[in-house]
Image (spheres, rainbow, N blue to C red):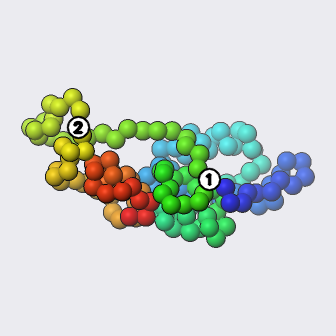
């Protein structure tokens, strides 16, 4: 975290906390996080900002947000990272696809397969490309 809301008298905060989230992780994690934050910090006002990873990193650097929920790793970044959970990648294909009956799929199996990807700027796009052996995992693809 680059900066944080300062506590004032009697456990109050002097300003709302600004939390960034990307569209890939936020919708799944926030419904679990927000009730916990509210129960532990009932006086905290939390403002959530959704944006692309690259924009959120710029906002962190500029102290416009206090923290961000982003998919890791943040390659080449100097921010402190705290992994919250880990999820596997899944290969999806029609039942008639040659790999449909495979017990496992490797990068080599996927190198020439067509892919359905999110638009540039979404962190999951870079992760999917890296998982399929098609380039380094980058946060700002």
The residue wearing badge 2 is 105
Residue at horizontal 39%, vertical 55%? 137
Q: Is the residue marked by circle 2 packed among few (<14), some (14-19), or many (20+) residues within 10 Å? A: some
Cβ atoms under marks 2 and 1 closer than 8 Å: no
- Asked which quadrant contains residue 136, the reply is bottom left
Could you say which quadrant of the image residue 117 lies in? Answer: bottom left
**What x and y, as percent, mark residue 43?**
77, 48
Secondary structure beneath dot 1 equals loop
Q: Quadrant of the N terminus?
A: bottom right
| Residue drawn at point x = 74 percent, y = 51 percent | 44
Left or right of 133, for residue 16: right
Q: Residue at the right extreme? A: 9
Q: Nearer the viewer, residue 100 or 139?
A: 139
How dense is the environment of label 1, judged by Cα within 10 Å: few (below 14), some, or many (20 and up)?
few
What residue is shown with label 1?
80
Separation (CA) of disc 2 from disc 1: 33 Å
* Percent coordinates x, y for residue 9 in the rendering: 90, 52
The residue sitting at 11% across, 40% down in the picture is 97
Q: Is residue 48 visible?
A: no
Quarter of the image for the C terminus: give it: bottom left
Taking the image as shown, residue 19 lies to the left or right of residue 118, namely right
Regarding residue 111, the answer to whether it shows in the image is yes
């Amino acid at each position: 975290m680059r900066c944080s809301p300062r506590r004032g008298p009697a456990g109050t905060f002097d300003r709302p906390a600004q939390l960034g989230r990307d569209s890939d992780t936020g919708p799944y994690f926030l419904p679990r996080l927000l009730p916990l934050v509210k129960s532990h910090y009932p006086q905290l006002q939390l403002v959530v900002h959704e944006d692309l990873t690259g924009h959120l990193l710029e906002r962190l650097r500029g102290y416009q947000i206090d923290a961000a929920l982003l998919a890791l790793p943040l390659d080449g970044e100097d921010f402190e990272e705290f992994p919250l959970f880990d999820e596997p990648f899944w290969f999806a294909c029609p039942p008639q696809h040659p790999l449909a009956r495979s017990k496992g799929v490797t990068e080599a199996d996927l190198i020439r397969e067509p892919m359905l990807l999110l638009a540039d700027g979404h962190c999951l796009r870079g992760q999917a490309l890296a998982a399929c052996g098609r380039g380094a995992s980058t946060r700002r693809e």
